Amino acid sequence: MRVLVTGGAGFLGSHLCDRLLKDGHEVVCLDNFFTGRRLNIAHLAGNPNFEFVRHDIIDPFKFEVDQIYNLACPASPPHYQYNPIKTIKTSVLGSINCLGLAKRLKARVFQASTSEVYGDPQVHPQPESYWGNVNPIGKRSCYDEGKRCAETLFFDYHRENKVDIRVVRIFNTYGPRMHEADGRVVSNFIVQALRGDDITIYGDGMQTRSFCYVDDLIEGFVRFMAQDKTVGPMNLGNPAEFTMLELAELTLKLVGGKSKIVHKPLPSDDPKQRRPDISLAKKVLKWEPTVPLKDGLKRTIAYFKTRV
Ligand code: NAD
Ligand code: UDP
């Protein structure tokens, strides 16, 4: 197949491009390099099955492809809050452009949605049936509500125009090719530990997240796109839940060095807890994560050692 990957020069997108090429597909990678970078796809430059197009997803585009994966959107809080209106346009107009193309081509289209649609969840762990607890006017809303609106668009195109959609809700995922300055917690802690800087825990560090290694997630994407039983939404993530204090301590132990843990103010609307209920993915995809946090962190640390 010929597959379009929007956001293909980003952290997840570049791993997805690798996987699709390995599976024998042709890949068209679209990206505007807002948070992604050439380095992530440099190794694919000479591959005759790989094509890069620099383009902003909010402007319409046309390609002849069989499948579309829509990943274009900044994912780290400091980056999606840098220009919140642009973030909303990316989710909403970007989705409309992908869905319009999918409708014309009768192509299956995948949306990278997020656990942020659950906001600061009052149901724990979060099943797909939970409607969430999202502040519509806060600093995270440009991302949360943009992604929620994108889900609405996907399901309306599906109901109204029979577009063949697949919607995945991704929980915190980490691994090689995250940007050193990404700002998300795993890359921040590793980079800080490697540089001997203070490890910055926001708030008391008792908030929780569940961290999935990138290879596990990409396997889930591919299995989800290949099946016909459900269009989603489907949670994909690792249900092993950690406090940020535990993550900081584990990172320090694995990296070694002399960094101290310091506490900084907690950003507004920071979810207190997050853990996916992955029963649906287990049942339909026969999928569950295989890489424990400690192993995934070791692989990610090895990558960052080449970068900092
Ligand atoms: P990332 O920031 O590394 O990748 C996003 C990519 O999209 C970048 O290459 C960026 O340049 C590109 N992009 C942004 N705006 C664009 C635009 N207007 N036009 C074209 N390209 C644009 O982040 P990531 O972690 O790889 O996330 C990929 C997708 O997965 C995002 O949609 C994100 O919301 C979603 N997601 C990721 C996680 C996670 O933990 N990694 C969790 C939930 C959802
Ligand atoms: N966090 C932290 N120190 C950092 C970066 C993030 O303590 O240097 C916290 C953040 O407040 C949140 C958690 O780690 O509670 C996960 O943050 P991230 O930005 O990685 O993802 P998200 O909040 O979107 O799940």
Image (tube, rainbow, N blue to C red):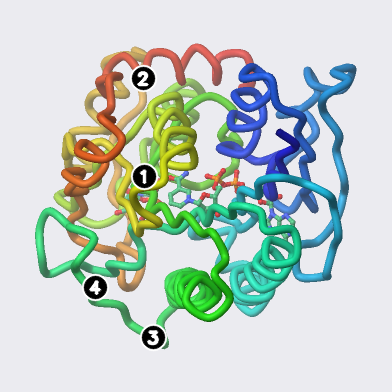
Labels 2 and 4: the sequence-earlier one: 4
Kindly state the secondary structure of the residue where label 4 is placed.
loop
In the displayed structure, 127 sits above or below 292; it is below
Q: Which residue is painted at 70% across and 26% down in the image?
A: 25
User: Reading the chain from its start, which is encountered first: label 4 or label 1?
Assistant: 4
Which label sits in the foreground, 4 or 3?
A: 4
Which element carries disc 3, helix, strand or loop? loop
Q: Secondary structure at mark 1?
A: loop
Label 1 CB less than 8 angstroms from ligand 1 = yes
> In the displayed structure, does residue 162 sit left or right of residue 174?
right
Give neighbour class at mark 1: few <14, some 14-19, many 20+ (Cα, 10 Å): many
In the picture, measured across the screen, residue 97 lies left or right of residue 200, that is right
Counting the numbered discs, the total is 4
Residue that carries the numbered disc 3 in the rendered image: 136
Amino acid type assigned to the residue bearing label 2 in the image: Gly
Label 1 vs label 3: CA separation? Answer: 21 Å
Quadrant of the image for the N terminus? top right
Which of the numbered marks, if any, corresponds to residue 172?
Answer: 1
Lower position in the chain sequence, tag 1 or tag 3: 3
**Which residue, given by chain and number where applicable, does mark 4 sit on?**
132
Discs 4, 1 touching: Cβ within 8 Å:
no
Element carrying mark 2 = helix
Per the image, the residue denoted by label 2 is: 296
